Image (spheres, rainbow, N blue to C red):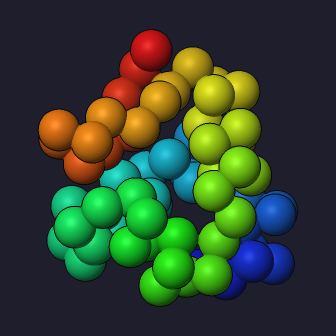
């Protein structure tokens, strides 16, 4: 996943990929953002647009 792919990806597909990466590769959202050089505000805004927010306890984006 890179920035160009992120920009053109459907929000729900992005949600699925990010949650998979959080589950399998990264211990936190911050670690994922650093690893893939993603902007926190942009990712959170995209997830909020489809009604999801990051839940640190489960390390996943969940429906609001």
Q: Give above or below for 64 relative to 9.
A: above
Residue at (25, 77) in percent of width and height: 25
Q: Give above or below for 1 relative to 47.
A: below
Where does the image place residue 4, in percent across and percent down from the top left? 81, 78
Q: Relative to 59, is 9 on the left or the right? A: right
The total of numbered circles placed on residues is 0
- Check the picture and name the quadrant holding the C terminus: top left
Q: Give above or below for 43 relative to 51.
A: below
Where does the image place residue 37, in percent across and percent down from the top left? 62, 81
- Check the picture and name the quadrant holding the N terminus: bottom right
Residue sitting nearer the eye, 37 or 1:
37
Q: Is residue 38 among what the camera can see?
A: yes
Q: Is residue 11 among what the camera can see?
A: no
Quarter of the figure with residue 23: bottom left
Q: Relative to 48, is 23 on the left or the right? A: left
Q: Relative to 8, is 61 on the left or the right? A: left
Residue at (65, 71) in percent of width and height: 38
Q: Residue furthest top?
A: 64
Residue sitting nearer the eye, 52 or 39:
39
Residue at (41, 37) in percent of width and height: 54
Where does the image place residue 59, in percent across and percent down from the top left? 25, 48
Residue at (70, 41) in percent of width and height: 46
Quarter of the figure with residue 5: bottom right
Where does the image place residue 47, in percent across and percent down from the top left? 60, 37
Q: Relative to 55, is 39 on the left or the right? A: right
């Amino acid at each position: 996943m890179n920035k160009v792919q992120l920009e053109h990806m459907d929000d729900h597909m992005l949600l699925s990929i990010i949650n998979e990466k959080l589950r399998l590769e990264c211990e936190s959202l911050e670690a994922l953002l650093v690893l893939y050089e993603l902007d926190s505000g942009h990712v959170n805004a995209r997830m909020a647009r489809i009604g999801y927010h990051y839940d640190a306890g489960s390390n996943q984006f969940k429906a609001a």
